[in-house]
Each structure stands twice: as structure tokens, then as C-alpha cells.
């Protein structure tokens, strides 16, 4: 395990736990080293390798787009266990350059390490719950490595599905589902008889298994219909419009079941479904136009009180921590947010860059603050209780991000109360009635509800 990879493997767990507080792993690998090629979806650009490299156990080398391997970054990326992959539109002699990479991947696999390949090859600008076609490169690398070691060592392939509530939403859910391993050695006879056929068939098998680890809507034109239905039913994975009382694994299952049902239908030929799709799109467009959240309409429809005794008690008891969160995290949060959103045009990069820069900025910002607090506050307050004020200061420094999380949630909760009060002054009953009608129409076609 390279040094930088090891450091990131340890350090990034903490900010990832804060960014995605609800994490579930299915069939999580137990070994640190294995000769396995992991084929994953690529829903969130740089966030995907951070999650796999930090939160799952196998030490893996990442296949990364070649254009980031500048002379300055190349040694750093190598220490982070990244290898370049050359694509046709990169303007390179891709075959020759990739042969060099294949030599390295063969050595990596023979040495007992794993590879992580994002089978789709790129990330969409808008997050959607579907898998794009998986490319053949992963299977080709596996067979190439087997040929180079004379088929003596076993090399495996496995799928890895990363499921987000929404990768760009702070506090969202994260579920990683690992498929079963396939031993490539068992396909030696088929590969030697017809290599192209074996590669195509195995790639198709990998793609199908990866779809099973995800919510996969086959028809791209119906992706948002799936999301709209899940939001109204509130039993899927949407970060705001789902019931947190339902376990994440069950909500993931519900989301996949609806997608599976849709994939079995001839959707475009069913007039009632087409009309429902249009009406759902108009409903959510209208909410966006009115600057109203679906969750607010749900609360009004169900006559639920957002400001109850429990929430009031939490707000009051959490006030000191909210103030500490403002002191320790507000300035770095605002600076990083403005810098990232101004510098990166593609929103898909925002969450991962904010995560890393935010963690670094908060860590640096709080060094002098905690030193001053130790010198002028901790010593005077704690000297009669303990002599280990330095240890206390270190512990305090480590839990500072939690104060920022409490502050963030408190302000969002207060904003929700304000928005809900403003909504009650409008003719919201019309929207509530429309929502009820849409929900009833969903029940008529989707019996699993």
C-alpha cells in the first residue's frame, strides 16, 4: 500500500462519515489484498474513488483518465495508487500507451493487489439512477494479466455498486453493494477458442450483475419518472423526500423494485403512464417555480407539525454547539463553497472537492483557534479538574467538525420552519390536492406500493 493511499485511506473516513452520515455496505470484502478487478458505476466523479479507497477494505489501484497525469502530478497520483487509462478522444496513441498501462496492471494483479475500474468511463453532469453501458476494458485487462502470468495465478472480477441518495447533497445516504466474484481462469478455454466472443459475453455478464447492485432504469427517458414516483411515495433514496424511519437497505430495495417493474413494461405504449409522467414533471416544475419543497407539501398534506416539543428541546440543547459550529466552521465553509462553485463549471465535481478542501480548510482554520482556547480558556476552566488540558484540546480539535454539522442542520431546520410558515399563507391546498391525486394514480398502476 503506497504511503499517500494509506494516509487518505485513514483520514478521509472522518469527513466522509460527516458528509454521508447514513452508510450501509452489503457483502463488504474482508481481505486487504486480492487479485480482483472491481468494476463500479461512476455516478459522482472523484467522490467514487474516495469512497471505495477509504471505506472499503481491499487495497486497489484506480484506473484514471490520462489527462490528469501531468509531470507535476504524476508522482503524487502514483503514490495515491492511480494508473492512467488512455481514451481515443484524448488524442494519444491509445493502443501503445495503454499497452504500457496493461503491463503495470498485470504486475499489480499478480502481486496480489486489486484494480478499480469505472466501467461506464465517465460521469453524467446530472445525477441519475441508471447504469450506462459497461466498456470491455476491464475484462480485457483481466485476460491480459492471465496471459502474462501463464494462467498460473487466479484473477477475479467483481461488481461494486455505489448508491447515493444524492452525491451532491450534504447529509445524504450512501449504500455500497458488492457483487459475487467471478474467477476469470474458468473462462480460459472459451477465451483461447474465441477471445472477442469471451470478452463480449463476460462484459455483458458483468454489466448485468452491476445493474443488480444499483437502481437501474433501462429507458433513460423515464429516469425522472422513477425519481418522481419515489419522492411521492417517500420510500426510496431521495435525500429530502424519503422516510428516514424506513431502513436504508429497504429503501434501496424499494427503489430497485420500481426500476425492475418499469424495465419490464412497454412504458411508451401505455397512455395512462405517459400522461402520469407528464403530470408528475409539471407538478415538480411548478414546485420549483414557486420555490416550494415537496417535503413541505407532504408535511401540510399529512398535517404534521415540524416544530414539536422534541424538536424545540433539540434546538435549545443544541444551541451552544451551534454557536461553536459557527465559530469553527462558518468561515472555511463559505470560502470553500464560493471557490469551488466559481472554479468548477461541472457540478458533479463540487461534492468531492468541497469535501477535501473543506476538511483541509477547517483543520487549518482551527489550529490557532484551539491553541488560543487552550491558552486562555481550557487551562483556567479545567485546571482544577484535570492536568491533561493539552489532551483535552486535541480531543476538542478532533470533534470540531461535528459542531459544524450541528450548526448546518440547525440553520436548515430553522429555514424549513420559516418556509413552511410562509407557505401556509398561500393557497397551498390546491397543490396538496394535486399531490393526493398523483399519489392515487400511482397506486393504481404500481401494486407493490
Image (cartoon, rainbow, N blue to C red):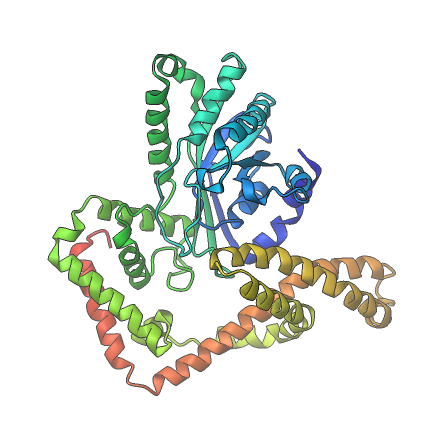
For residue 76, above or below residue 98: below
Question: In the picture shown, does residue 64 fall above or below 11?
Answer: above
The residue positioned 45% from the left and 76% from the top of the image is 416
Q: Is residue 334 above or below residue 230?
A: below
- Depth check, front residue: 323 or 2: 2
Where, by quadrant of the figure, is residue 369 drawn? Answer: bottom right
Q: Residue at x 84, y 59 (%)?
A: 390
Which quadrant: the C terminus?
A: bottom left
Horizontally, residue 421 falls left or right of residue 350, namely left
Residue 106 placement (x, y as % from top left): 55, 23
Q: Looking at the rendering, which quadrant does residue 394 occupy? A: bottom right
For image coordinates 32% across by 45% down, the residue present is 216
Q: Nearer the viewer, residue 56 or 340?
A: 340
Give the number of marks.
Answer: 0
| Image quadrant where residue 243 sits | bottom left
User: At which x and y percent is residue 203?
Assistant: 37, 29
Q: Quadrant of the N terminus?
A: top right
Q: Please give left or right for residue 193 compared with residue 49 in the image.
A: left
Image location of residue 154, percent across then percent down? 50, 18
Q: Identify the residue at the far bottom of this view.
A: 425
Percent position (x, y) of residue 424? 35, 84
Q: Is residue 440 left or right of residue 223?
A: left
- Whether residue 307 is visible here, answered yes or no, is no
Q: Inspect this view and state whether residue 198 appears.
A: yes
Q: In the rendered image of this protein, does residue 395 appear above or below residue 414?
A: above
Amino acid at each position: 500500500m503506497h504511503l499517500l493511499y494509506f494516509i487518505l485511506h485513514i483520514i478521509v473516513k472522518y469527513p466522509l462519515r460527516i458528509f454521508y452520515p447514513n452508510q450501509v455496505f452489503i457483502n463488504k470484502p474482508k481481505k486487504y489484498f486480492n487479485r480482483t478487478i472491481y468494476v463500479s458505476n461512476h455516478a459522482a466523479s472523484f467522490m467514487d474513488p474516495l469512497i471505495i479507497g477509504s471505506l472499503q477494505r481491499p487495497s486497489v489501484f484506480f484506473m484514471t483518465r490520462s489527462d490528469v497525469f501531468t509531470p507535476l502530478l504524476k508522482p503524487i497520483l502514483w503514490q495515491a495508487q492511480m494508473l492512467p487509462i488512455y481514451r481515443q478522444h484524448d488524442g494519444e496513441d491509445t493502443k501503445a500507451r495503454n499497452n504500457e498501462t496493461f503491463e503495470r496492471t498485470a504486475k499489480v494483479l499478480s502481486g496480489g493487489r486489486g484494480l478499480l475500474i469505472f466501467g461506464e468511463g465517465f460521469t453524467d453532469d446530472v445525477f441519475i439512477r441508471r447504469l450506462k453501458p459497461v466498456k470491455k476494458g476491464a475484462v480485457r485487462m483481466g485476460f491480459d494479466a492471465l496471459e502474462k502470468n501463464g494462467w498460473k495465478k487466479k484473477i477475479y472480477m467483481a461488481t461494486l455498486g455505489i448508491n447515493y441518495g444524492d452525491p451532491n447533497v450534504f447529509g445524504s445516504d450512501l449504500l455500497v453493494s458488492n457483487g459475487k466474484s467471478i474467477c476469470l481462469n474458468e473462462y480460459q478455454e472459451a477465451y483461447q477458442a474465441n477471445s472477442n466472443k469471451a470478452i463480449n459475453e463476460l462484459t455483458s455478464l458483468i454489466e448485468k450483475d452491476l445493474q443488480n447492485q444499483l437502481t437501474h432504469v433501462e429507458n433513460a427517458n423515464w429516469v425522472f419518472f422513477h425519481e418522481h414516483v419515489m419522492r411521492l411515495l417517500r420510500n426510496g433514496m431521495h435525500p429530502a423526500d424519503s422516510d428516514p424511519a424506513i431502513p436504508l437497505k429497504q429503501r434501496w430495495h424499494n427503489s430497485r423494485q420500481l426500476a425492475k417493474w418499469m424495465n419490464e413494461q412497454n412504458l411508451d405504449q401505455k397512455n395512462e403512464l405517459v400522461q402520469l409522467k407528464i403530470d408528475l414533471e409539471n407538478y415538480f416544475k411548478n414546485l420549483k417555480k414557486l420555490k416550494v419543497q415537496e417535503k413541505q407539501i407532504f408535511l401540510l398534506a399529512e398535517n404534521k407539525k415540524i416544530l414539536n416539543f422534541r424538536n424545540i428541546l433539540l434546538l435549545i440543547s443544541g444551541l451552544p454547539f451551534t454557536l461553536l459550529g459557527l465559530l469553527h466552521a462558518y468561515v472555511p465553509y463559505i470560502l470553500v463553497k464560493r471557490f469551488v462553485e466559481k472554479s468548477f463549471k461541472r457540478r458533479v465535481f463540487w461534492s468531492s472537492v468541497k469535501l477535501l478542501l473543506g476538511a483541509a480548510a477547517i483543520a487549518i482554520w482551527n489550529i490557532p483557534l484551539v491553541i488560543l482556547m487552550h491558552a486562555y480558556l481550557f487551562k483556567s476552566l479545567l485546571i482544577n479538574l484535570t492536568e491533561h488540558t493539552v489532551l483535552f484540546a486535541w480531543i476538542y480539535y478532533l470533534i470540531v467538525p461535528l459542531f459544524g454539522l450541528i450548526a448546518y442542520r440547525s440553520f436548515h431546520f430553522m429555514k424549513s420552519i420559516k418556509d413552511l410558515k410562509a407557505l401556509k399563507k398561500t393557497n397551498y391546498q390546491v397543490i396538496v390536492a394535486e399531490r393526493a391525486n398523483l399519489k392515487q394514480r400511482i397506486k393504481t398502476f404500481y401494486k407493490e406500493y
